[in-house]
Image (cartoon, rainbow, N blue to C red):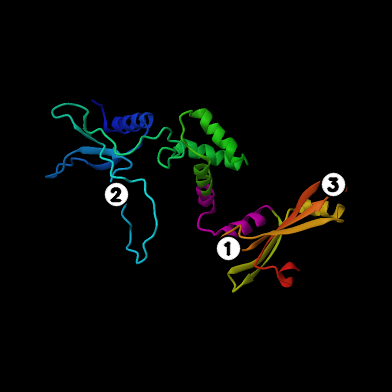
Amino acid sequence: MFATQDDILQWAPSVAYEIGFVTMILRSDINIGMRGRTSFMLIGCKRSGQYGSRKKDFVRRITGSRKCGCPFKLHGKPVVGGQGWMMKLMCGSHNHELAKSLVGHPYAGRLTKDEKTIIAYMTKSMVKLRNILLTLKEHNANSCTTIKQMYNARSAYRSSIRGSDTEMQHLIKLLERNQYIHWHRLKDKDVVRDIFWCHPDVVKLCNACNLVFLIDSTHKTNKYRLLLFDFVGVTPTGMTFSASFAYLEGERVNNMV
């Protein structure tokens, strides 16, 4: 016997997590006074049903799915002539092994609204993801979140800040806002060919330590397929510092110069 429908939605997942599986709402409806409409809720295992491809492919793809037609089902409906909801176990068996731990499960490890707020705040403070994950684990010892889900949450947060701008447009805006020394050239008036930037304070350091510079490029680090060029300076004491960075479309002399 449960007081409200929300109580069921809190009770069912918590009990399932302790046993070793994840629940989901298979079907539900609300009685709004129309004929044939009744309030009910059908809860099943996350692995119930069968996977169905969204489109027919001429070439069969090798895919995997968590769904295995699990028969576990709970049926809930309002108490007739009374207050609250009543739950009935329609099938209490599973056709798969229960997980010993739900850590890494995409559904069980979902971040709450408060956790996403913490990630956004600590990301702005330049806190490393592993330290953010430790903070979330301290607040909730039963959290099943992994570092991969943290990366996804941080990427979603940064995309929300960027808005409708592309990564390259957002980079140029940040360089102009923070008064970086930067230069770029375009191709076809809207495609960046090369872009170079340097922090103003680093220019003074480069003028003082201009004897040795290490230059190297990294391939395939972004979706634009631009080379990431890194310029590293060396001080007389043997310490290194990042002098500047550049994205180049190629390693030709024209791009290098």
C-beta proximity under 8 Å, tags 1 and 2: no
How far, Cα to Cα, is label 2 from label 3? 62 Å
* Residue 160 image label: none
The 10 Å Cα crowd at callout 2, few under 14, some 14 to 19, many 20 or more, is few
Q: Earlier in the sequence, mark 1 or mark 3?
A: 1
* Residue 50 image label: 2
Residue 45, by quadrant, is: top left
Q: Is residue 98 left or right of residue 44?
A: right
Measured as percent of width and height from the top left, residue 108 is found at: 41, 37
Q: Quadrant of the N terminus?
A: top left
Q: Is residue 11 left or right of residue 215?
A: left
Measured as percent of width and height from the top left, residue 120 is found at: 54, 41
Residue 189, by quadrant, is: bottom right
Residue most extreme to the bottom: 188
Which region of the structure is painted magenta? 156-178
Task: Specify the principal SS of the magenta part.
Answer: helix
At a point 71% along the width and 69% down the height, the residue shown is 255
* Residue 238 image label: 3
The kind of residue on which mark 3 rests is: Gly
According to the image, label 1 marks what residue?
Answer: 224
